[in-house]
Each structure stands twice: as structure tokens, then as C-alpha cells.
Image (tube, coloured by chain):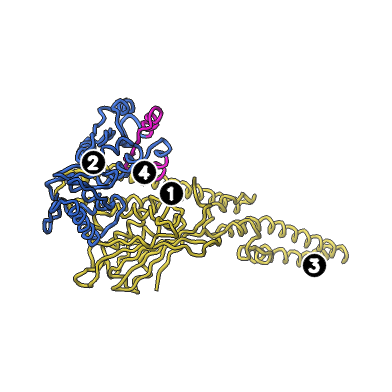
Chain colours: A yellow, B blue
Amino acid sequence: MSARRDGGRPTDTEGERSGAIPASARFGIAEYLGAHAGQALLCLAMVAAAWPLLRAVGATRDAATLLDLLLALGLALLLLSGYLRERRCVEDLRRVADSGPDTLSLAAEVTHPGFAEGDGAVDALQATLLAANHLVSEATSREADYRDFIETWVHEAKTPLAAAELMVQNLGDDRLRPLSRELERVNAYVEQALFYARGASLERDYLVRSCKVGELVRAALKSRMSQLIGAHVSVDLSGLACGDDPDGPTVYCDPKWLEFVLGQLLDNAVRYRCDPQVDGRTPRIRFGARVEGGGRAGETVVLSVTDNGCGIREADLGRVFDKGFTGANGRSRRRSTGIGLYLVATLCQKMGLDVGVDSEEGAWTRVDVLFPANRSRMVS
Amino acid sequence: MARIFVVEDDPNVRRELLTLLANAGHDATGCKGFSDVAREALASGCNLVLLDLSLPGTDGQYVAREIRQSSDVPIVVLTSRTTDLDELMSMSMGADAFVAKPYNGQVLLAHIDAILRRTMARHDADRVVESRGLTLDLSRSTASANGREDELTKNELRILELLMRRTGRIVSREELMEALWSSDAFVDDNTLTVNMNRLRQTLAKLGVRDYIATHRGQGYSA
């Protein structure tokens, strides 16, 4: 059993937008007559009553028939022109009502039809549109503002953290080692806040570059050095090698984002590690990289991070990427926020990477990050 | 070992950086002001510049470009801005490395060492540590004593260097491991034990016995 999150593939809605009017929005003549049943009946009654009336006032049979036919034709043309005028307006409005995510842009295209009810409806629509756009732009600027604040705040918080970290190291007192570990954890939480803001933002503010998976893994390991060493976790990088290159295959991603993602996986591996006293094995993290579908268009590099920790219950496996989900492990162990893997999924999705998790409870957990080997996404 | 000029506006970080560098055997000076920091750096005749990106009244990237206009001195950019764009910008301004805050001291020193090894031919000549009759040649990766010499592996060299720089003080296993991890050797407990044993055997071959003392539950000292 394994869970998988796919990178966002935008669905193509362009096709149906400017094409023919969908059946559900069509406004037929029968429907028009039904909506204006009173008028139609009145017209029929007038045509029916006209002939006897004309005869009564002394018109010949032929003259009465001709005049009545002319009246019928006139009324029919009147009804038809009314229908044609209304049809465009009704169909436009229905299309707006039925549309999904493009409602706002479709609504902006509706023009005044030239009759009172239609003009009134379109006026109301345009006023609503204006108000909605105003709210959206306000929310967007508020979000951007908040994000700026988070970026600045994180930036500021890192200077005292750096000073404290260096102080601890310069004192060179082994009793302060736990403090150094705590500082590393504070920094990890600060980074989470930063990447939470980045992940939630609508902007595509990452920069895809080509990097070696080995470099990314080593940078992430160094960022969690105190915790990994303190928890006596062995690290095995031998699975990264690809041919003669110990640094493994090249992938395309934002290295800062990916280091953060790997950091979250390392945090989990440390938090849910096995206990040598209880499980009879020492904690270990194994990194592996392989190229799937080599040479073809769908070529993918898979980076896998496998630990031999407590694993994930099968029932929880499908939900580990959900925001706020902590599962059985999170409840029984301390300080699970249900944010780490959610951020992993969110950031990978934004970068167009896939991520999947597989596990056996009580034995191991493996997280795979899938990089499409597609250079076209690269920004130089 | 090398003369390093530190440009950092936060007084606490600056003080700790200077201490860290001095402890590692470097001759470190901090900048006095920020108005003409590029000229100050060049005038100091340093071998390397540590440069913070956010500075009062000026910008680190501007300073880097100014230094680069008249000198090839290596520049290591320190910053708390964690966007890739900053890193790319700094590199295009002529910086040689980019280290994000908060930095682990060992990682920072490893960065500095790697750059100095690349850029400083003279630097290699002084890379010798001596203590209690044992001489460690860092550039040739050899230990010598009593007229005998033997080669050391990268890990053994790193371990012995750290112990010799702290002669008489106990260095914990965690600290040794952090130093090794900082130079990309992600050893575990067992590997460290193996490395220690090999190192002791090598030293014994040189006729130096009991050079490294084990302090149970605390670490090692030389």
C-alpha cells in the first residue's frame, strides 16, 4: 500500500471557452414562448378574433382572410424579434452561471443587450464583478503583504540564531551541546513558517536549476547535523551513485526548496526512529537515486529516502500528506504538527515534482521524490 | 593560517565570528564602518573576505562588486536571505561561496578551508600543526615524529587536526563527528571508532604512544 501525490497538471479549459454554446445554456424558441405564454396567447386570440370582426364590419371573405394573415405575420415577426433579442442575453448569462473557474472572465465579456430587463441584469452583474475583483485584489495584496512580513521576520530571526549558535560553539563546552540541538530545531521551525508562506502563495517564486542529487542531500544532512549525530543515526549515501558519479544523477529543481523538503524528511526520520533497546536495530537513513524510463520522453529521476524507523500504519498511509494529519505515530510521539509532510507535498507540487510514501509498520518508511527529467522547466 | 576580513553589521555575530576564526588559527579582523568597507577590506591585505549581504547604508552585493573590480580576493557571502535568487546574484557579483545563516561554525570553517586551499598557494606552506613532538602537515596529509613519517586518510587527518588544535582539552565524539560531517564525511559511531583505532596504530608506528587519551563518556584529548 502506498500513497502518492501528483504534481499539478493544469487542466485545459481553453477549448470549450469560445466554442459553441453548451446544450445546457441553449435558449430555444419554445422556451421563449413558454416564458412569454401570456403574450403568445394574446396574439393567437387577436388573430382568431380578427377574422370574424372584419367580416362583421363588412369586409369581403378574401379581404378578411388577407388582413388576418397580415396581422398574424406581423405578430409572429414581433415575437421572433423579441426572441432573437433575448436569446443572446439569456445564453450569455447562462454560460456565466454554468462556468467553473473562469466565471469572472466570462462575466466580464457579457455586454448590454439593449432591452430594459437584460440591461438591468447586466448592470447588476457588472457591479458584482467589480466588487468581486476589488475583494480579490485586496486579498491578494494582503497576502503578498503578509508574505513579505514573514520573509522579513524570518530574515531578522536568523541573525540572533546565528549569533547564539556561534556562541555555543565558541564556548566549546560539551554541556551546551543540547542547546545547540535546540537551536537547530528552532531554526527548522522558523524555516517551516517561511516555506508555509511560500507554499501558500500563488506566485511561482522558485528558481529551477540543474543540481546533483548528492549535493542536495549533503546540504540537507549538514542542516540537521546536530540532531542526526545526537540521535546516533547512521547515514548511507552509497545508493546515490549513478555510474561513475558518486553524486548521482542530475535533477531540475529549486535547490533551496528541495533542501527544505529533504530537511522535513530527515526531521521525520529522527523523530520516528527506532529504539535500539526495544527494536534491536540501530537507526539508519538510506538515500538512493535511480533513473526510470531512461532515454525516453518520460524519463524520471527517483530520489528515495528510506529509514528503518517505526513505520506508518496502513490506515494512515493515504493521509500523511494532508494538512494537520498526525496519525497514530503523531499521537503517541511528541510534537507532531502535521505540517511537515503537508509542506513537502505542497512544495513538490508547486515545483512540478511528484512525491510518494510507502511503509511497513514497525519496520521502515520510504519517501520517493520524482523529478521529471525535463529541461524545459529550467530557468537560466 | 590566513588573514580574514569580516564584514557583518550585527555586533554579536561579528564578535562570535572573530572568536570562531581566531580559535581555528586564523588572523581575523572586523570592519570598522560600512561607508567605505570595500576599500577597508582591500587595505587590510586579507586572504579572504566574509561578507554579510544586508548592511546598513549599503548592500553586500554592491560591496562584493566593488572589491571584485580591483581584487581577486575570495569572498564568502553570509546571509539570512534564503532565496536562490540571492545566491545567484551573489555569485554573479563575484562571490566564491554562499553560506546561509544560522551557520554551523564547523561548516563555515570547512567552506573557508576549501576556498583557501584552492586560492592560496602560500597558504599550503603554513598548513602545519605541531604539538608535543608530533607534526601534522595538512597539505600533504602526513604525520611525522621521531624522524619518521606516515600518510593519513582524510578522516584521520581531520580528527588529529581537531585534537591537536585543542591540545589538553577534551573533544567529544559528537564534535569530532560534526567536524567530519562538515567536510562531507558522514560517518557514524562505528566508523569513528574504526578511524580512531587506525589513527592510534599509525601514531604508534611513528613511535608516539598514548598520544590520544580516551575519556570515558566524554571524548578524546591529545
Residue B44 rendering spot, x and y as whole percentages: 28, 27
Q: Is residue A66 visible?
A: yes
Task: Give the spatial CA distance, label 3 vs label 2.
Answer: 126 Å
As rendered, which of B205 and A77 lies closer to the eye? B205
Q: What residue is shown at x 32% (from left), y 70% (from top)?
A: A364
Q: Which mark is residue A148?
A: 4
> What distance separates the C-alpha of mark 3 from that of mark 1?
82 Å
Q: Are marks 3 and 2 in contact (CB under 8 Å)?
A: no
Dots 1, 2 in contact, CB < 8 A = no
Q: Position of residue A305 (x, y in %)?
A: 36, 63
Position of residue A350 measured from the top left corner of the image (x, y, whole percent) = 44, 55
Nearer to me, A166 or A195: A166
**Which residue lies under the disc numbered 2?**
B128
- Neighbour class for label 4 at 10 Å: few (<14), some, many (≥20)? some
Q: What amino acid is found at the position of numbered circle 4 in the picture?
A: Asp
- Pointers 3 and 4 within a single chain: yes
Q: Amino acid at mark 1?
A: Tyr
Residue hosting label 3: A52
Comparing labels 3 and 4, the label whose residue is closer to the camera:
4
Percent coordinates x, y for residue B95 in the rendering: 38, 37
**B75, above or below A14, in the image:** above
Q: Which residue is disc 1 drawn over?
A: A206
Q: Chain of mark 2?
A: B
SS at mark 2 in the image:
strand
Q: Nearer the viewer, residue B81 or B196?
A: B196
**Res. A178 visible in picture:** no
How far, Cα to Cα, is label 2 from label 4? 48 Å
* 4 and 1 marks on the same chain: yes
Q: Secondary structure at mark 1?
A: loop
For label 3, the crowd category at 10 Å Cα-Cα, with few meaning under 14, some 14 to 19 and many 20 or more, is some
Distance, label 3 to label 4, CA atoms, is 82 Å
